[in-house]
Image (tube, helix red, strand yellow):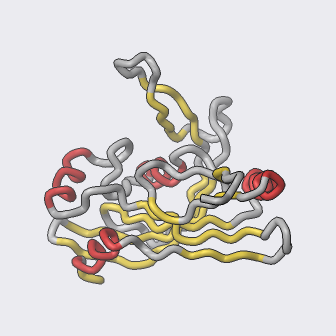
């Protein structure tokens, strides 16, 4: 409360939990935002997807195009879709995927993934994973409506996407800072009720 200056360094989707960096000085904000723009930070998320993620699928290099969907209020809702390489409307987007755990729930197979983003596009992880046939559990924009309804009835009431790890260079000390935020209790409880396979 005593801080005279607080500013968000980056953003997370509203439904995403985890690490969010805040600067207390304008000089720190600029230095940290430069690191994000130059892609020198390391951002890794935990995402639970519906289905069995293929073990060989480790890199998603798929350009994304941002567009607006008409809404009743005249504002429009931001959406993103994958486009072929070379599409003039596509922005480069690269996600690195590693299987953390394969899970079995009474509703079916699920996979907990570690996703490191090399670019920071709007809804990048959500669209990349959905484009591979494994949408994030609980994702209302890019997921499966019927599956999400089943997951809600079973107790997963939010999207399972969590900003897990963040590495950056401290703007004053120039030391590498490594942060990690464990899963929130409701997501940890969901993983625990599933069986590892």
Whole-percent x, y for residue 85 in the image: 64, 41
Determine whether 62 is above or below 51 in the image: above
**Which of 71/10 is in front?**
10
Q: Which of these two is toward me, 42 or 61?
A: 42
In percent of the image, x 35 and y 50: which residue is there?
139
- Residue 143 screen position, x and y as percent: 33, 48
x then y, percent, for residue 79: 47, 35
Question: What residue is shown at x 19% (from left), y 63% (from top)?
Answer: 155
**Number of residue marks:** 0
Side of 195 where 4 appears, left or right:
right
Q: Which residue: 46% across, 73% down?
A: 55
Image quadrant assignment for residue 17 = bottom left
Identified at 62% across, 65% down, the residue is 43
Q: Nearer the viewer, residue 3 or 71?
A: 3
Residue 38 in view in this figure: no
Image height of 147 relative to 195, above or below = above
Residue at the extreme bottom of the image, as rendered: 196
Q: Residue furthest front?
A: 2
Quarter of the image with the C terminus in it: bottom left
User: Which part of the image, by quadrant, shows the N terminus?
Assistant: bottom right
Position of residue 127 measured from the top left corner of the image (x, y, whole percent): 47, 47
Residue 69 in the image: above or below residue 79? above
Query: Does any portion of residue 74 appear in the rendered image?
Result: yes
Q: For this view, does 90 lie left or right of residue 141?
A: right
């Amino acid at each position: 409360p005593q801080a005279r200056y607080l500013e968000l360094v980056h953003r997370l989707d509203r439904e995403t939990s985890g690490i969010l960096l805040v600067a207390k000085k304008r000089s720190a904000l600029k230095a940290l935002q430069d690191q994000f723009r130059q892609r020198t930070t390391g951002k890794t998320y935990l995402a639970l997807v519906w289905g069995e993620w293929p073990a060989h699928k480790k890199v998603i290099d798929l350009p994304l195009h941002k567009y607006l969907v008409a809404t009743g209020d005249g504002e429009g809702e931001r959406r993103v879709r994958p486009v072929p390489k070379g599409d003039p409307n596509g922005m480069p987007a690269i996600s690195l995927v590693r299987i953390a755990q394969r899970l079995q729930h009474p509703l079916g197979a699920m996979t907990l993934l570690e996703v490191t983003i090399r670019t920071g596009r709007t809804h990048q992880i959500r669209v990349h994973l959905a484009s591979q046939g494994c949408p994030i559990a609980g994702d209302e924009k890019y997921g499966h409506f019927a599956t999400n309804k089943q997951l809600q009835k079973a107790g997963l009431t939010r999207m399972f996407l969590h900003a897990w790890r963040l590495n950056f260079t401290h703007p004053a000390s120039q030391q590498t800072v490594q942060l990690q935020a464990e899963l929130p209790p409701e997501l940890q409880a969901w993983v625990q009720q599933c069986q590892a396979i």
